[in-house]
């Protein structure tokens, strides 16, 4: 598509939202992430690219401490959000996850109605005062996730009855309904058709005005289209991290270059 | 698809390189034969087990169903004041001085009178022989009825009197003239008289509610034995088991599955739960005897003790399927809940537990059904005792002596009188009906919850 859009993009914010330094992740003996330093800027879309198994999802899961739920997973180094260390013993991961929302690689709607899926987050966080407000949150979330037109007549039917791509958009709606400050998206478009993908990309661009988005993707074009900054992971190392335009047009590392030109992956 | 010859330009057709599809090759034939053989084995296995089941049910029902019918004598009975209430006060406490012997005389008089009125010949029979066709339990039943309604004294009432078990057996085909000749408990003449009474409309068979409601009866009175106390006892025990094992079992399985760290200790606990589920149930009886009766001092034969013992026995059998049900909930659901900022507890109670509920409930009901049919541990804690008094209302009633359905089956099968064989089979039918109902409830709950969003 139009890779020319890269040039138009400028990073409008230079405030760092998340600062990760020397992050190491071990799954038991498996050293999955080695010494990753990343700054995720506020109100910016950051893309993580890299071959399968290089640790993109792993790093993403470090950012909202979803790795806590995996037995034998050890995270070392420091990750700060708004200069607060999220691995501080005083931090309650539940509170953190309300701030850092996540869309998973595989769509995982609750086996409840579409409405309940989206309303669940606002409900447990007490974000709305009455049913009308909740209805409104559900509607705007579904609209922004480009699902409203398909779902408005079947809000009471189960979310698991949607198609794969619709389920993924439902998960996106569910994540943005809690209005997080950071949204982590693990390959959100891998199950979507080009039209829905374009809608989601539009949404991501729109979300950028309020919070920072981190997106993992296998599509170079998508990374180029939606992100302002791109990180390239390879075999657990962060190989290169910088402005998207620079990564795609003028990569410094030969590995980055061979990946984006399709020679490794 | 489209007919090639009808198409624009018929292309030359390629030749198959692997033989025709229309004939089976040797490998396919062998595979199909193996499949057909396997299906046949399966069908044979199913047929055999169905036959066994049908045979079992048939034998139980054919032996046990007569227990639900009973022979009664219906006739007017005069309740003379001078015999039953000399004081004339109608005070049950005073009237209780008249024992069942006094009421036996009343019944005998009524029977003699009825026989005379209908002109039935009783030649060669002593009054004792005539009275012998009535159940030994009948005077007690009449006495209880009169003591409960003292105002009946002085009137003539229509009262249904149980016939003797041998007479009842005669109409059910269990007793014949030949066996009666060898039997010291019954004489052929009495059976002839019974037949005449039937012809005269005094004696008849009808549905026997007493089998469900009466308490157990002593060795010589199978006709009066019922399951009342056993059903109440079993019901109380099931309440105790349900109330204790549902929360404990669910809490334990949720904790072990969702919260407990995976380490040596939890491994050990897991192995022990699996082992406990396999421990023979009589061991739990010994434990219950030692702990609940000897140590804690709870009463013997009480449903509370039976319930506690059965709870111990049932818990591991509930926890294992409950954990399996929790484990089968996909982890992505937990991730999803945690991902929107739910706490562990919220993710469990809002999402995981509802999804696991059908499995947990099914395991629970199967565990309860097993507990309902359990006999061995109850024998050790004295539930086999002969109990005639109904236990009281809950919760005090939990501490009163009671029996239990499977134990009642057991104790009836060891009794001498052949009348109890039919009672035992009848009790098995009642037990099976309860189990069937419980399993049906399990299936219904499963269906209900599985598709609920
Ligand atoms: N739960 C886990 N337990 C053990 N090892 C894991 C686990 N999750 C990931 N790994 C390992 O960590 C490494 C990185 O995995 P990760 O899922 O982060 O890859 P990825 O970059 O997201 O790949 P993909 O693009 O295929 O999703 C892999 O070697 C993987 O085997
Ligand atoms: Mg991944």
Image: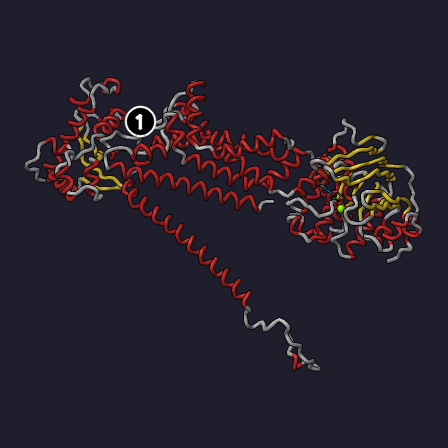
Residue at 51% in and 41% down: B362
Whole-percent x, y for residue B263 in the image: 64, 31
Whole-percent x, y for residue A226 in the image: 85, 50
Whole-percent x, y for residue B271 in the image: 55, 33
Q: Nearer the viewer, residue B223 or B79?
A: B223
Q: In what quadrant of the picture does the N terminus of chain B appear?
A: bottom right
Residue at 52% in and 39% down: B361
Residue at 22% in and 43% down: B172
Q: In what quadrant of the picture does the C terminus of chain B appear?
A: top right
Q: Is residue B117 above or below residue B284?
A: below
As helix, strand or loop, the secondary structure at mark 1 comes to loop
Can residue A139 be seen from the camera position used here? no
Check the image and name the residue furthest to the left: B124
Q: How packed is label 1: few (under 14 Cα within 10 Å), some, or many (20 or more)?
A: some
Residue at 70% in and 51% down: A151
Q: Nearer the viewer, residue B21 or B453?
A: B21
Residue bearing the label numbered 1: B386
């Amino acid at each position: 598509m139009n890779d020319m859009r890269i040039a138009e993009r400028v990073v409008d914010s230079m405030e760092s939202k998340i600062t990760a330094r020397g992050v190491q992740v071990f799954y038991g003996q498996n050293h999955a992430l080695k010494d990753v330093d990343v700054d995720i800027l506020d109100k910016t879309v950051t893309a993580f690219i890299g071959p399968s198994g290089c640790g993109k999802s792993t790093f993403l899961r470090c950012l909202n401490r979803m790795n806590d739920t995996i037995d034998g997973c050890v995270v070392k180094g420091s990750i700060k959000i708004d200069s607060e260390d999220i691995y501080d013993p005083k931090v309650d991961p539940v509170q953190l996850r309300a701030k850092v929302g996540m869309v998973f690689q595989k769509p995982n709607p609750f086996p409840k109605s579409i409405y309940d899926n989206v309303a669940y987050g606002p409900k447990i966080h007490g974000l709305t005062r009455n049913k009308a407000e909740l209805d409104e949150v559900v509607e705007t979330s579904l609209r922004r996730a480009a699902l409203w037109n398909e779902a408005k007549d079947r809000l009471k039917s189960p979310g698991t009855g949607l198609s794969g791509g619709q389920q993924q958009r439902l998960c996106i709606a569910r994540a943005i309904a809690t209005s997080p400050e950071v949204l982590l998206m693990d390959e959100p478009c891998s199950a979507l058709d080009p039209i829905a993908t374009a809608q989601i990309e539009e949404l991501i661009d729109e979300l950028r005005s309020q919070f920072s988005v981190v997106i993992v993707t296998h599509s170079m074009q998508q990374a180029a289209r939606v992100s302002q900054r791109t990180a390239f992971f390879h075999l657990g190392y962060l190989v290169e991290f910088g402005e998207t335009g620079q990564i795609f047009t003028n990569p410094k590392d030969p590995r980055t270059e061979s990946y984006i030109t399709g020679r490794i992956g | 698809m489209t007919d090639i010859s009808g198409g624009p330009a018929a292309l030359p057709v390629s030749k198959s390189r692997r033989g025709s599809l229309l004939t089976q090759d040797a490998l396919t034939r062998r595979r199909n034969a193996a499949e057909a053989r396997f299906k046949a084995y399966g069908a044979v296995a199913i047929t055999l087990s169905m036959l066994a089941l049908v045979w079992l049910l048939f034998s139980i029902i054919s032996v046990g169903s007569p227990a639900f019918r009973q022979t009664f004598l219906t006739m007017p009975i005069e309740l003379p004041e001078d015999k039953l209430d000399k004081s004339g006060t109608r005070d049950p406490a005073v009237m209780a001085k008249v024992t069942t012997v006094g009421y036996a005389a009343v019944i005998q008089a009524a029977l003699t009178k009825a026989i005379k009125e209908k002109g039935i010949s009783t030649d060669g029979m002593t009054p004792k022989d005539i009275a012998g066709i009535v159940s030994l339990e009948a005077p007690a039943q009449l006495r209880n009825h009169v003591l409960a309604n003292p105002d009946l004294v002085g009137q003539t009432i229509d009262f249904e009197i149980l016939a003797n078990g041998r007479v009842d057996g005669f109409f059910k085909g269990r007793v014949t003239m030949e066996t009666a000749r060898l039997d010291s408990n019954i004489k052929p003449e009495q059976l002839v008289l019974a037949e005449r009474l039937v012809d005269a409309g005094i004696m008849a068979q009808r549905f026997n509610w007493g089998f469900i409601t009466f308490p157990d009866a002593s060795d010589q009175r199978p006709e009066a034995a019922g399951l009342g106390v056993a059903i109440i006892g079993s019901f109380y025990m099931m309440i105790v088991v349900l109330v204790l094992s549902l929360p404990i079992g669910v809490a334990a399985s949720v904790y072990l599955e969702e919260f407990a760290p995976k380490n040596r200790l939890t491994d050990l606990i897991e192995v022990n739960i699996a082992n406990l589920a396999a421990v023979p149930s009589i061991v739990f009886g010994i434990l219950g005897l030692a702990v609940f009766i000897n140590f804690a001092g709870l009463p013997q034969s009480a449903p509370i003790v039976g319930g506690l013992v059965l709870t111990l026995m049932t818990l591991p059998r509930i926890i294992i399927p409950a954990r399996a049900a929790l484990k089968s909930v996909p982890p992505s659901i937990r991730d999803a809940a945690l991902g929107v900022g739910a706490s562990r507890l919220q993710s469990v109670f809002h999402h995981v537990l509802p999804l696991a509920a059908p499995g947990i409930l099914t395991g629970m009901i199967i565990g309860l059904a097993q507990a309902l049919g359990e006999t061995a541990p109850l024998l050790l804690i004295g539930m086999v005792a002969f109990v005639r008094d109904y236990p009281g209302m809950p919760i005090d009633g939990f501490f009163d002596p009671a029996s239990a359905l499977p134990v009642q089956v057991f104790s009836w099968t060891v009794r001498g009188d052949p009348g109890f064989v039919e009672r035992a089979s009848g009790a098995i039918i009642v037990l099976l009906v309860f189990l069937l109902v419980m399993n049906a409830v399990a299936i219904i709950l499963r269906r209900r919850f599985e598709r609920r969003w």
